[in-house]
Amino acid sequence: HKIADLIQKKRTERKKSFAVLLDPDKIDLPSFPEFLGQAVACGVDFFFVGGSLVTRYAIDDMVAAIHTHTSIPAILFPGNSLHIEPSADAILLLSLISGRNPELLIGQHVVAAPLLRQSSLEILPTGYMLVESGKLTTVSYMSNTIPMPSDKPGVAACTAMAGEMLGLRYMYLDAGSGAQQAVPEALIAAVRSATNTPLIVGGGINTGEKAYLALEAGADIIVVGNGIEQNSYLLPEIAQCVKAFNQKTLKAI
Ligand code: 1GP
């Protein structure tokens, strides 16, 4: 349970983590090692690899490059069971609990279970909740599910509570990649106080300020994808923001 232990240890120390979502479609492999070097220098904690639609099937190459150039864990963030890559370190085994599509609640998992059992991937059972973000996101379209309303913290809290009661060990609030609006702080805070699992938050976090607000509202791990590809200053900016948050918390203890 290497990664589970790492996440738990950080929570006990009241430290937040920074995950970078890498879309295998969008990374230009020749310049990828340089990007990985920058991620190491910035203290990125985790790489999430995947997305709801992957068209280049370069997941194995991407995991190999991560392992060659860094010691940062490569955690799969699969859109479906075709995105399982056994050379990664772990997999967010996502059950899309905000939706009512049985395929993504349990169907794909049944198909994946024997593959996962054969692999040495660490399994991170995750309640995945999509939140409405102002426009239709790829993940909402691909998953054929309606996101949760962004102004109903109670719905999010009850959904997460049910997920935790069902045994899911992580919660992920996602506004979807490239979301116009990130997950509102009130929603993050509601899920934080209703559950005790580590909370991952992502989607539309494209400034240091938005990252800080998500952390303050109760996110344990923030995920940034799209923004980093579009703006090379964002990686150091968010990394700095997570560090500053952690230092502030340490001083307050
Ligand atoms: C999406 O949470 C991730 O699943 C990251 O979103 O690409 O908008 O940063 P962005």
Image (cartoon, rainbow, N blue to C red):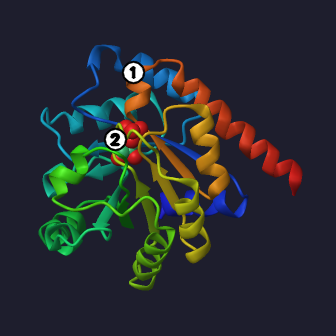
Name the image quarter holding residue 165: bottom left
The x and y percentages for residue 43 are 60, 34
Name the image quarter holding residue 129: bottom left
Compared across the picture, whether 198 is left or right of 224 comes to right
Residue drawn at (51%, 28%) of the image: 39
Residue drawn at (49%, 22%) of the image: 37
Look at the picture and state if 16 lies above or below 179.
below
Q: Which residue is mark 2?
A: 177
Please state the quadrant of the image where ligand 1 appears: top left
Measured in 3D between alpha carbons, the distance from the residue under mark 1 to the one under mark 2, in whole angstroms, is 12 Å
> Quick one: label 2, few (<14), some, or many (20+) residues within 10 Å?
many
The x and y percentages for residue 59 are 23, 38
Q: Please, what is the three-letter code of the amino acid marked with disc 1?
A: Gln
Mark 2 lies within 8 Å of ligand 1 (Cβ measured)? yes
Choose the circle earlier in sequence order: 1 or 2. 2
Image quadrant where one finds the C terminus: bottom right
Q: Is residue 21 visible?
A: no
- Residue 230's disc number: 1
